Image (cartoon, rainbow, N blue to C red):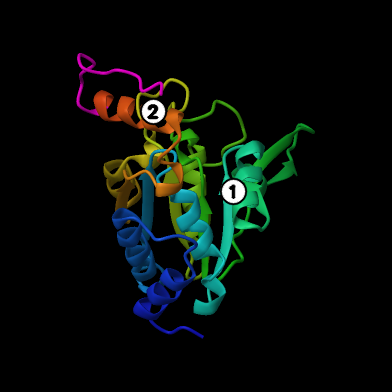
Amino acid sequence: MIKTAQEFYNDIIDKFPFEPTMSQDVLLEKLSKFIFEDKKESLFLIKGYAGTGKTTSISTVVNNLWRASKKAVLLAPTGRAAKVISGYANRQAFTIHKKIYHPRKNKSGGVDFVLQTNKHTNTIFIVDEASMIPDSPSGTKLFENKSLLDDLISYVYSGMLCKLILIGDTAQLPPVKLDISPALDIHKLTLNYQKDVTEIELDEVMRQHEDSGILINATQLRLILKNNGFRNFQFQLG
């Protein structure tokens, strides 16, 4: 079994299916340190555009966690997103709701959804499409505390030696009635949830996707939006 972060990093670099980009290499090194560090309140935040290798990087880590005596639980906000992460990691994934809540009859004969007990140990919870997770009250009995994000974080960190990795794209639409995605906001995660957050954003399109016209134009648009200007933008159609 692997005993150190450096050994784990070397191992996943050897098993990586392609030559990693510079930002992927940094991501894998930081993830290795995160997996082995003993900080109870640490949380890892991965942001990146489509085609930058979030999927490849995480699937490589997930499929080698057992060598570090760690386990993984894959989650997503929707059933469709859960199927996607399950497909690329080649293991079962759940919706957040199905994993962290269980139904319980109330006094009026209806059903409330309450937070389950996290019985996992030494487990990394990995949530894809985290941009869709709200941090505001739902107005229903579904969320036991205040919001889905509140309950997710409460559930994960109630388990013994359990930690959370949130993955998302800041260019995707945030939850309804919100301007930004709270689960991708390092300041909110740090201040509201008292987490020690490691953040990295992938911004290099992998070589395997460099010939994709859609990704080329999408990446250019994202960069222009980030810099607040459209004056010199032209679609590449060739």
Residue 115 vs residue 96, the one in the foreground: 96
Q: Earlier in the sequence, mark 2 or mark 1?
A: 1
Residue 33 percent location from the top left of the image: 34, 70
Quick one: label 1, few (<14), some, or many (20+) residues within 10 Å? many
Tell me which amino acid carries mark 1.
Answer: Ile
* Kind of element beneath mark 2: helix
Residue at the spot x=53%, y=71% of the render? Answer: 64
* Disc on res. 85: 1
Considering the image in quadrants, where does the C terminus appear?
Answer: top left
As drawn, which residue projects farthest toward the front? 238
Rendered view: 168 above or below 99: above
Residue 237 is a magenta residue: yes
Magenta segment, which residues? 226-238
Residue placed under numbered mark 2 in the picture:
218
Q: CA distance from mark 2 to mark 1?
A: 22 Å
Task: Tell me the amino acid under the disc marked 2.
Answer: Ala
The residue positioned farthest toward the right in the image shown: 109
Q: Is residue 118 left or right of residue 182?
A: right
Q: Position of residue 90 (x, y in %)?
A: 65, 57
- Say whether residue 228 is left or right of residue 29: left
Asked which quadrant contains residue 7, the reply is bottom left
In the rendered structure, find residue 131 and report the number of the disc placed on it.
none
Main SS type for the magenta part? Answer: loop
Front-most of residues 210 and 91: 210
Kindly identify the residue that appears in the image at 27 percent across and 24 percent down: 225
